[in-house]
Image (tube, rainbow, N blue to C red):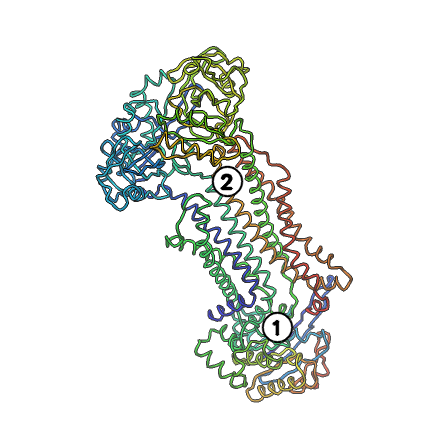
Amino acid sequence: MIRNYIKIAFRNILRKKVFSLINIIGLAVGMAACFLIFLYVKFELSYDSFHTKAPHIYRLVTDVKTPSETIHAGITAWPFAPNIKDDFPEVEFFTRVQQTSMLITKDDKKFQEDRVLWADSSFFKMFDFRLIKGDPDKVLKDLFTVVLSKTAAKKYFGDADPMGQSISLYDYYPAAITGVMEDIPENSQIKADIIVSMSSLTQTIIPGLDEQWSNFDAVSYLQLKPGVDPRALERKFPAFLERRNGKEMEKSQMFFTLYLEPLKFVYLFSKRESNIEKGNITNVYIFSVIAAFILLIAYINFINLTTARSVERAKEVGIRKVVGAEKNQLVKQFIGESLMLSLFAFVLALILTALLLPLFNQLAGKTISTGIFDNYNYLLLLFTLAIGAGLMAGIYPALVLSSFKPITVLKGRFATSSKGIVLRKGLVITQFAISIALIIGTIVVYKQMTFMRSHDLGFAKDQMLVLDTQGDAAKDALTQEISKLPGIKGTTLSSSVPGGSHSTAYSEIENSNGDLQVANLDLFFVDFDYIPQYQIQLVAGRPFSREFGMDTTEAMVINEAAVKYFGYPSAHKAIGKKFKQWGREGKIIGVVKDFHFKSLQEQIEPLSMRIEPSRSYLISVQVAAGNLPASIAAIESKWKTLISNRPFSYYFLNEFFDRQYRSEERFGKLFLNFAILAILISCLGLLGLASYSTIQRTKEIGIRKVMGASINNIIGLLSKDFLLLILIAFFIAAPLAWYFMNQWLQDFAYRINIAWWVFVVAGLLALLTALITISFQAIKAALMNPVKSLRTE
Amino acid sequence: MIELQHISKWYNVGGKPVFILKDINLKVKEGEFISIMGPSGSGKSTLLNIVGMLDMPNEGAYHFFGESVYNLKDKHRNELYKKNIGFIFQAYHLIDELTVYENIETPLLYQNVKSSERKAIVADMLDKFNIVGKKDLFPSQLSGGQQQLVGIVRALIAKPKLLLADEPTGNLNTAQGEEIMQLFQQLNQEEGVTIIQVTHSEKNASYGNRIINLLDGRVEPSLQNASH
């Protein structure tokens, strides 16, 4: 019996090659897309879950309340964690980490390393980063001890044993290798190749850091003893801070509140800023929904195409019933067939997934999986998913087919119930609504991307090269030398460039009431040439000038946002007002027009600018349009003569600024791909339905042709119904897409409005593809010889 | 064997019933070979389908080997049908996707006959009807007469007591038709299979031993009496 079913299923697949191919490919593509997204979601959810002690590890975070605002920080001041460990027996271990970039040398090897981490000595006891060599209790205990990843060890020592050897940090401090660890997995929030003992930083490089209660820069983790309630511990923190730091908080008017975030919560859910990698739960949700939708579309297709074929299978059903088949036997047969199809599709989907995985990794910007066969549990899960869905999709066609009345179908006349048609139409509407919504989404994402790239940022970002001297002593000399080169329009030294990192300073500024108001101001250290070279417009007062000797210490330029923040009605009113900031006092000399020093996702915040050569490490070079490679080569040769110990590297400011949108760009690309996929699969489904309905109406078409209907009349007749479906789908999709894309746009402080034409374009696009799809069938039907089609009766 | 009592079937058109069959009473004994005749639309096929349990009347009773068919549960009726009735159609109605062998085998599948047993039965029948050489061909590769032969073999494979044929020679030429009729006669006389066929042809009808004439859904009384 089963062999008979399988045989018949096989022969059916082979006999209707095109149809089977459409059906299997549609299903396989849908499954593959779903699998990929599934792998991505699994990967995102797996962050930091490999730490066996994860349930007991918490990130310590701080709310900082100043008189004007509350900052939700993902970081802590340096002394918090060690003192909490001292004061509370509930805490088993603490580890502070800070990611940094430094020049590392070993003999003639010299690298600017970006993946360097300062970490306290319990690091390897708390986290499950596996040491290949070295004792987790000892590796980071002493000053200037280093653990290298396998990759880093290979890079610096080749095949030789690095243990006990030394490298030089900042090309200055010798440090001993005390351990080698496995490379940190991709799904770890903490990423590093070189881990250096924290004491080196807090005791030797910046002595006294452990006592600076308002210097926020460390990401702190606490491991609580089993059974400790984190909420109860949190409630004890205010008293702790009061005891340890109460006076200082009162004096600076900055009040701290500490919270504990479970380790597994941090990556995806925490909204707090810190310098470690962050996920986005919204994206995970969005992609899960898209995956479900695509699978849904693929299965709707499957249902539609299979039921469409029921006309052809009707005769077989009739015969089988006449020779004694019972309904449930037929149901089993047809479900078996759909299972077999979905099994084929599953195998094909696995192949597709395996082939597309590298591409998807590239799109996602990280290696979510190296291969689907890495983990048999995944395979099993995907298999269950495929079979379950195959069953679901098979049930409806099976029931329809098996309920045909034998004598009616054998006589060749049979009308399907109007209920079935309504269902199938509903399914097509669903498919197209999803497709149209995805098209709208894609257009909106791309519009926003273009908007951000072309938006006037309020400063000159083109033809601007940025060199990071890392604070090398020769930076001023280098700047001088570069400015003398031909093809260079200007140079300026600063601590920060737009789109990059900058300090936030505790400041006191005289406000419109004449009081000194405390605020956390964003701070750029610049030089005299910065404002003119960046073409930042001045609104009031004057820019920094070499003619005023005190400008280097007692002058501040603020932006319009700051003017508003301190309550001045106009920029001119703020000129000459007092400021205190990081040990300097002086007057505001100028106000600049707001420029986007952060990405367009964020509002322009109040900004202060001061001159401080000792903290200005970045050289911005404005090059003339023209021979760029020559200019870069010339700059490089100057660098090599003046800063020979550091590798030369540079970036273009416009690219650097746009890198902030990389995740949005990736999002947009993925969105586009899935939208195309959705509409493709939907069209396959439409093709199925169109062919079905054409067969149903063969007689009608024949009669109309005999009565004199033209080919165009017939095509119009057949297309009309479907276009109506697309129209309905459009009216369902448009408001939903509008709502969700508006939500998505809320993440951007500067955003586009969704224009009406976006909807029109999306609707027309769907309509057009549908029209092309339908016309294949319609033209075929219209060209049919009426004598032939009438004979089928 | 078969007893139909007061069988009526009608459709409602515009609120009025239009009768296809009206108060049919019919008795068939085992071993009979009956031909149902009548003009188009007289209800021949409907009557045959009702006898074959593929269709239900609106009114009346049907006893098959003493069992009241319409009082049986679906499952039992299907069982009764599977065991006792074979159907042959004008358009052969073979499953295009299956070979001759598999088409013939299908009824046995639905009766849960064991694989080895099935093989023996099918081989036996193929041999008997001289179509062993055709067993791996698909229906589309056979002539009409050969297809109908396969249809008959399929109808007989489960050794039914009653063979129902709806214009079995309708699509065949005279020579092929005659062969089929002779086969029917042989089955009836040598193996005692009860046969009821619907036919337009007087000549085909003459192979049987009783003719029932239908007109407008009624059995023509004169001819019925004459045949008794």
* Apparent side of residue B210 relative to residue B117 in the rendered image (left or right): right
Q: CA distance from mark 1 to mark 2?
A: 76 Å
Query: Hey, which quadrant is residue A507 in on the image?
Result: top left
Q: Is residue A28 above or below residue B82?
A: above
Please count the marks in the image. 2
Callouts 1 and 2 on one subunit: no
Depth order, front residue of A268/A102 = A102
Which residue does the numbered mark 1 point to in the structure image? B61
Please state, as top left, top right, bottom left or bottom right, where the C terminus of chain B lies in the image: bottom right
Which residue does the numbered mark 2 point to in the structure image? A665
Q: Is residue A515 above or below residue A199?
A: above
Q: Nearer the viewer, mark 1 or mark 2?
A: 2
Tell which subunit mark 2 falls on. A
Tell which subunit mark 1 falls on. B
Q: Residue at x 28, y 40 (%)?
A: A148
Question: Outermost residue toward the top?
Answer: A514
Query: Hey, which quadrant is residue A732 in on the image?
Result: top right
Depth order, front residue of A581/A719 = A581
Whether residue A128 appears in this view of the structure is: no
Residue B124, labelled with which disc? none
**Amino acid type, residue under disc 2 in the picture:** Glu
**Amino acid type, residue under disc 1 in the picture:** Ala
Depth order, front residue of B150/B6 = B150
Please state, as top left, top right, bottom left or bottom right, where the N terminus of chain B lies in the image: bottom right
Q: Is residue A291 above or below residue B224?
A: above
* Apparent side of residue B200 relative to residue A109 in the rendered image (left or right): right
Whether residue A167 appears in this view of the structure is: yes
* Apparent side of residue A163 relative to residue A193 in the rendered image (left or right): left
Q: Position of residue A686 (x, y in %)?
A: 61, 55
Q: Residue at x 55, y 87 (%)?
A: B191
